[in-house]
Image (spheres, grey):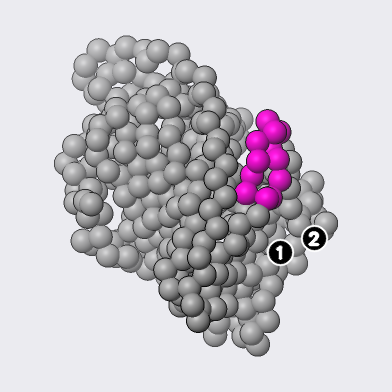
Amino acid sequence: MKNIYGALCCGLALFTFGCATAPETEAPAPAEAPETPVVQEVQEVQPAPNSKASVTTKFFAKNKLGQTVMQYTLKGAGGVVMDVINYGGKVVRLYLPDKNGESKDCTLGFNDVAGYETVDPYFGSIIGRYGNRIANGLFVIDGVTYRLPTNNEPGGIPCCLHGGAAGWDTKIWNAQPFQNGDTVGVVFTTTSPDGDQGFPGKVEAKVTYTLTPENVWRIEYEAVPDKKTPINLTQHIYFNFNGEAEGTILDHELTLCCDKMTPVDAGLIPTGEITPVAGTPFDFTTPHKIGERVDTKGDKQLEYGNGYDHNFVLTNPSKNGELAQAAALYDEKSGRYMEVWTTEPGIQFYCGNFLTDKMVGKQGKAYQFRGGLALETQHYPDSPNQPNFPSTIVEPGQVYKTTTEYRFGTK
Ligand code: BGC
């Protein structure tokens, strides 16, 4: 297998930007993505002798097409427990022990597929092919313009968000649970056909969730296209360390190991600048409560996002495929603590500014504005249209490969 840095370097060496000199032609109209055939294989996993860890599989629900969605419970030897489903690879429940050892579900989500199919803001999902926004749903590769159907319009400005209306968060993935001693996980695989949501090329994708006895949730993303295409995969889990539907995240203390960010316009599309955070409400290089500066009057960036909804640039990004720390999150009351480590150069900090009480969660309680936050490791938004951002274009046959870890603990 190619090492990660090798794959990234290769991507960088083979940059192709939207401003190609060849005459522009239109890509063929986006194909309707055929449904991936769903084969339900319930694979029971042999428990490891003398291990506190386990993986169990059960029926979760049927989706609107009548397809069966399965749930995999990963019980970690270190105390963290997660329920994940093969619909979008969603983390439905995430039980995190507090400083007294008491566990609570600390993620937002729904008990059924219907919730995810209607009002869902990507709770707990794998995001693909392109995490975050692509301006106007348009990009050019080698002189060919690709048009992605738009599915989002902040400030009235349309864009393609998180891979389109039927992105990888809506797919039923093939799933293979596994246990190796005290380590448990699930391997999700899928094929995204050529033209899926307007993107060029067929992509074979594999996303592996691993839960270690040290309470690390590792996510390894792999994707191989057969045509030149942008790929930017992430995970959209929402955290609330007070517990699911237990108030806001404004009292959580956040550190971002990022001395720069990519400012946006009213459509939440990067302007192309990469600006220092020093002296702004975006400086989380030392820990700050999220609520402290989120409503700073007169800050245009906070106004556009209605709070934090921005890509931050790692000060010391990954080298040679090693993970670099991107963030830390701490809730003093519960003592819950988390670090985010990644091979990606950026991280979107979104503090739940689009959450409303129209969404009712797993305990039957309404969610609230800023009732959860996402820390999405990624390449920068709209990279296919931003010549000075690291490239997200993957060549045919090239292995796109990134890793992110959410390391849970208490303080
Ligand atoms: C984006 C938000 C968006 C949300 C969807 C986040 O990744 O940054 O702008 O509204 O996803 O729920």
Judged from the image, the secondary structure of the residue bearing numbered disc 1 is loop
Q: What x and y, as percent, mark residue 27?
A: 37, 15
Instruction: Indicate which disc, 2 or 1, sits on the residue closer to the N terminus.
Output: 1
One can see residue 70 in this view: yes
Residue 352 position (above or below residue 272)? below
- From the Cβ of disc 2, is ligand 1 less than 8 Å away? no
Question: Which residue does the image show at 50% across and 48% down from the upper left?
Answer: 175
Quarter occupied by residue 223: top left
Q: Is residue 117 left or right of residue 379?
A: right
Q: Is residue 296 left or right of residue 262?
A: right
**Magenta segment boundaries in residue numbering:** 59-70
Q: What x and y, as percent, mark residue 53?
A: 53, 74
Q: What x and y, as percent, mark residue 339?
A: 46, 71
Question: Which residue does the image show at 52% across and 19% down from the upper left?
Answer: 32
At label 2, the amino acid type is Gln
Return the residue nearer the eye: 354 or 213. 213
Mark 2 lies on residue: 363
Mark 1 lies on residue: 244
Residue 29 belongs to magenta span: no
Q: What x and y, as percent, mark residue 243?
A: 70, 69
Judged from the image, the secondary structure of the residue bearing numbered disc 2 is loop
Residue at the extreme right: 364
Question: Which residue does the image show at 69% across and 72% down from the upper left?
Answer: 104
